[in-house]
Amino acid sequence: MSRPSLKITRHDDREPPGDVAYEVWNPFTATYEPQSSLDDGLLRVGELAEQVRQMWVRHDPTLSSLKDAPDPAEDDETEWAEFRVGAQARLVYETRNFDQRGWQKAMNRSAAVETICNEVSYVAS
């Protein structure tokens, strides 16, 4: 099952507010989509998760063609954190980051968002 995700990347060479970037993994296009804010990214992840969930409910055969976010490059030294949503009958949230590249389950959406924000020292304003 492919899952949309939200990734936050810290850019230490930039000044706030441009020191972080937001991207949403779109499993339909197999690309990261830049987002202008955390809220916009959360909204887009929710939209994509609902589309995937509806496909799952309808047993849509094209569901198998959707793609998960790629594994990060081993030599990537950028600070980043990401959460993804498994959208079936019950939503499942998982997180990973530059130090912990394997996916770990989160208790809920709020915990997943808090985890990725903490990992890159991002404080929502």
Image (cartoon, helix red, strand yellow):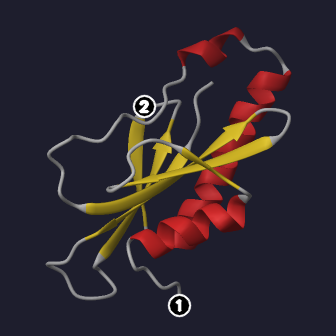
Label 2 sits on a secondary structure element that is loop
Q: Nearer the viewer, residue 69 or 17?
A: 69
Label 1 sits on a secondary structure element that is loop
Position of residue 124 relative to residue 38, above or below, is below
**Residue 99 in the image, given as x and y percentages of width and height:** 33, 56
Q: Residue furthest top?
A: 61
Q: CA distance from mark 2 to mark 1?
A: 30 Å
Q: Residue at horizontal 29%, vertical 80%? A: 18
Query: Does residue 37 appear left or right of residue 63 in this picture?
Result: left
Please name the residue that numbered disc 1 is placed on: 125
In the rendered image, which quarter is residue 2 located in? Answer: top right
Position of residue 70 relative to residue 107, above or below, is above
Q: Residue at horizontal 41%, vertical 59%? A: 81
Position of residue 63 relative to residue 86, above or below, is above
**Residue 37 in the image, given as x and y percentages of width and height:** 48, 72
Q: Residue at horizontal 61%, vertical 51%? A: 45
In the rendered image, which quarter is residue 39 located in? Answer: bottom right
Counting residues from the start of the chain, the first of labels 2 and 1 encountered is: 2
Q: Callout 2 environment at 10 Å: few (<14), some (14 to 19), or many (20+)?
A: some
Query: Does residue 42 appear left or right of residue 8 in this picture?
Result: right
Residue type (three-letter) at the residue carrying disc 2: Ala
Please name the residue that numbered disc 2 is placed on: 30
